[in-house]
Image (spheres, rainbow, N blue to C red):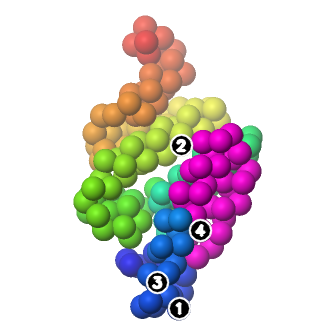
Amino acid sequence: AGSGQLAPGTTGAMADRVGAAAVAGISEALDALSSGDPATARTILDGVLNDSPARIDARVLRARCHRALGDLSAARLDLETAFDGETWIEVHASGAMSGILLKSHEEQLNTLLGDGMGLLIAIQLEAGELDLARQTLLDAQATLGAGPHLAAAEARLLRAAGETAEGW
């Protein structure tokens, strides 16, 4: 695990168990979220993040749960934590999702990061932070390239800026 990936004091076989438990927890949370139960998904992800606080995937999913439950400030906090500094860029560049070092997860990671960035931009727009949303979009596009979540975020940004013709 990289720096900050696991709770302090986690080593060796314990780290393997924590990683496996996190993957299982995220899978269970995805099932709950897909079944329309964001409260249960959030509770599961709380446990995952308690043991593995730097899991970007769990943090973005929990932000989706918070949003579904109407708690935009908690959603924003999770997204800002997930995308704080260079950590998420390093994870993205390595093709590794929060310590899962399988190259096959790169596409899933790109989708997850695009989804998370799109959600953060939407929250910034809802808060009336047009300039911050524009900068977040530019940073995300520079790192992730174009994608459906960022294209949708760009359209929302253009509409919010009054550029309705360009936003369609």
Query: Which residue is labeled 1 in the image?
Result: 9
Q: Do the residues labelled 3 and 4 touch (CB within 8 Å)?
A: no
Pick the residue in front: 105 or 5.
105
Q: Is mark 1 on a helix, strand or loop?
A: loop
Query: Which residue is labeled 2 in the image?
Result: 120
Tell me which segment is drawn in magenta. 25-53
Residue 30's x, y, as percent? 57, 50
Sooner in the amino-acid sequence: mark 2 or mark 4 = 4
Residue 97 placement, left or right of 103: right
Sooner in the amino-acid sequence: mark 1 or mark 2 = 1
Sooner in the amino-acid sequence: mark 1 or mark 3 = 1
Q: Are marks 1 and 4 in contact (CB under 8 Å)?
A: no
Image height of 119 relative to 99, above or below: above
Q: Considering the image in quadrants, where does the N terminus appear?
A: bottom left
Q: Is residue 4 visible?
A: no
Crowding near the residue tagged with mark 2, few <14, some 14–19, many ≥20 C-alpha atoms within 10 Å = many
Residue type at mark 3: give it. Answer: Ala
Query: Rounded to the nearest whole Å, what is the CA distance between mark 1 and mark 4?
Result: 16 Å
Q: Residue 48 carries which label?
A: 4
Q: Nearer the viewer, mark 1 or mark 4?
A: 4
Residue type at mark 1: give it. Answer: Gly
**Mostly what secondary structure, the magenta segment?**
helix
Sooner in the amino-acid sequence: mark 2 or mark 3 = 3
Q: Nearer the viewer, mark 2 or mark 4?
A: 4
Query: Which residue is labeled 3 in the image?
Result: 15
Residue type at mark 4: give it. Answer: Val
Crowding near the residue tagged with mark 1, few <14, some 14–19, many ≥20 C-alpha atoms within 10 Å = few
Query: Rounded to the nearest whole Å, what is the CA distance between mark 1 and mark 3?
Result: 10 Å
